[in-house]
């Protein structure tokens, strides 16, 4: 059974990405800012499996929805957090 609250770094592990502070920072620097007209799961840097996971997490308000929302805000840059 999934635990009810997942941490931000656990989302990176779930997506098959480096989940340490340095890896997360590199990912965010490489992909920020994500244009406001692109939905997170539609970003061009996801694999089909990653995009499907993100889409499902948001649509079903799954246990991963909170860290997925955090990732979305982080990728939007300062404008995305206003």
Image: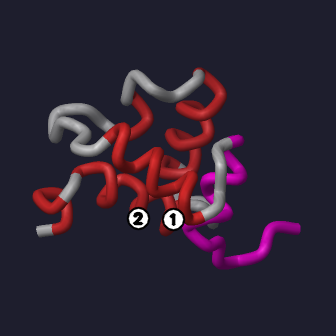
Residue visible at 51% across and 65% down in the picture: 67
Q: Position of residue 48 (x, y in %)?
A: 59, 21
Residue visible at 16% across and 33% down in the picture: 37
Marks 1 & 2, CB-CB < 8 Å contact: yes
Q: Position of residue 7 (x, y in %)?
A: 61, 73
Per the rendered image, the range of residues in magenta is: 1-16
Badge 2 element? helix
From mark 1 to mark 2, how far is it between C-alphas? 5 Å
Residue 5 in the magenta stretch? The answer is yes
In the image, taking residue 82 as reference, residue 59 lies left or right, namely right
Which residue position holds label 2?
70
Which residue position holds label 1?
67
Q: Position of residue 28 (x, y in %)?
A: 39, 49
In the image, taking residue 67 as reference, residue 30 lies left or right, namely left
Residue 35 in the magenta stretch? The answer is no
**How has the structure been colored for display?**
secondary structure
Q: Position of residue 23 (x, y in %)?
A: 57, 52
């Amino acid at each position: 059974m999934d635990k009810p609250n997942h941490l931000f770094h656990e989302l990176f592990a779930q997506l098959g990405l480096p989940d340490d502070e340095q890896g997360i920072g590199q990912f965010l620097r490489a992909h920020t800012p994500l244009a406001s007209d692109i939905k997170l799961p539609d970003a061009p840097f996801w694999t089909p499996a990653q995009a499907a996971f993100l889409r499902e997490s948001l649509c079903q308000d799954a246990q991963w929805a909170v860290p997925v929302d955090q990732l979305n805000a982080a990728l939007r840059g300062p404008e995305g957090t206003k």
